[in-house]
Image (cartoon, rainbow, N blue to C red):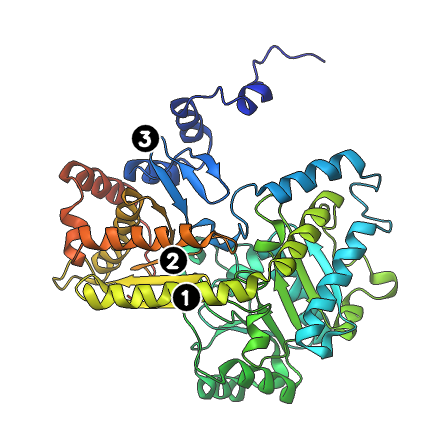
Amino acid sequence: MTTTTKLIPVQDVLDDRLRPQQVRDLELRHGNEELLYGLDLLGVAGPFRRLSPWELEDVGGQRMIMAASYAATPFGEMHPELTEFVTEFMAKNRAMTLPQQSLSPWRAALEANLVALLASQLPSHADSQVFFCSSGTEAVEGALKFAKAWRPNASYFISFKAYHGKTYGSLSLTPNPEYQDIFRPLVPGALTSPYGDLEALRTLLRRVGPKNVAAIIVEPIQGEGGVILPPTGFLRGVSDLCREHGIVSIADEIQTGLGRTGHWFESAAQGMDPDIVTLAKPLGGGLTAVGATIVRHGIYKKMLGGLSSKRHSNTFGGGALSMAVALKSLEMIVEGDLPERSLKMGAEGLERLRRLQARHPGLIQDVRGQGLLLAMQFHPMVGLPLPEPAKELAYEATAILAMRELHLSGVVANLSLSSKRTVRLSPALNIPEPLFGELMDRVDDFAERNPKASSIMSNTPPDLLARLAAFAVKKPKKRTPSDG
């Protein structure tokens, strides 16, 4: 059956024939209109053109340094080594592309390499097994199901006011009312304990009974929470408590794993020996969607043993292209010794931020970081006491307008919506050192133009403030109490 519908030719997009205004109009009409409208008001929505793996050009022709993408572009945008490999893969691959019910050389190689890498840090995982999916939240969903299968009579899962994703199981363990409220009732049994407080965790376990807890899931460093590092010994303590009571321990390494924080696995570096590790972001190399759940052999078999081996599945998980890109990404991280590089450069970046905070104490309240996962927390741009809903809105506006000011200095940064006055910097692990230095210089420029938090608001044009306020009032939502 033919159609007379006029479609946009793929060649128009490939040849860059869609003008920025056309892209904007189509996205606002058919995509996530409210999000894109807000970003467009701020002048940070793009579309962007890639100048190099680490640099972009915005619609005004400004050269930007990329320090965003929520840690999902370990080599920047379309790194030549990776894209050349994909071209070679397309020309040479003869393996089945979606081997859902067959053996796959690409999947086999990636499974083996991931387990070998984890076992090099945690020898207890030498015989672990891997389940592949297409995203981080799916990796967490799989982890929760593996844990429940291992302890079927347990009713509870414990998390630590962290971000684990937005599908139902992971959302249930992401205690953020802004994300959760209209979707209730959520998956029952989700409990929250204060991050970094082992005694509070012990108290919670005594209250509900350890035998009733299927799993404890923890981000080794809280990313969405604003790059919050746990106190020394906390992760080891969580691991010990789980082992003592037979509870499944899950390390959510989706943002921290594979070099971002300067270690292969941040949980292992902090003394944790988790039963399950979830991975995603860097595995895709910024080109494909890949998630992985690495599970101890016995736990894996309990859920996917014998005739129950199809109890959990994923249509695109394990596809040849995604496995090939992940395999090459892992190889590039290993050969470039990118965890060590991230550790060194991140220490330099954190020291730069500390000096910046000392020079501008009225702007920056705190700086935090580990490896190339860095954060600045700003003072509120409105110093007056405000009622709770207005205070949270003012906190969020502080980071949003700071992100705009960073953009004006040529830096693309990340928000942290669970820590609303915090902006994150997560540049590529292989960013050239001179460019990293320039990135930090541009952050300095941002601070010089905004020596106090109130400057962030006074430097915003009044008409833009009015439009943003109208947008916020027009679309009220329940705001999440944050750490400020």
Residue at (56% x, 69% y) in the render: 263
Residue 454 percent location from the top left of the image:
15, 55
**Left or right: 210 as drawn, with respect to 29:** right
| For the residues bearing labels 1 and 2, Cβ distance under 8 angstroms | yes
Q: Amino acid at mark 3?
A: Gly
**Depth check: 483 or 45 in front?**
45
Q: Amino acid at mark 1?
A: Val
Inspect this view and state whether residue 85 appears.
yes
**Depth check: 14 or 172 in front?**
14
Locate the C terminus by quadrant: bottom left
Label 3 or label 1, whichever comes before in sequence order: 3
Q: Amino acid at mark 2?
A: Arg
Residue 225 percent location from the top left of the image:
40, 64
Q: Secondary structure at mark 1?
A: loop
Locate the N terminus by quadrant: top right
Inspect this view and state whether residue 256 appears.
no
**Left or right: 28 as drawn, with respect to 465:** right
Q: CA distance from mark 2 to mark 3?
A: 24 Å
Q: Which mark is residue 249?
A: none
**Left or right: 371 as drawn, with respect to 282:** left
Q: CA distance from mark 1 to mark 2?
A: 8 Å
- Classify 10 Å Cα crowding around label 2: few (below 14), some (14-19), many (20 and above): many
Q: Which residue is mark 2?
A: 424
**Depth check: 372 or 25 in front?**
372
Q: Which residue is mark 1?
A: 227
Q: Which residue is mark 3?
A: 60
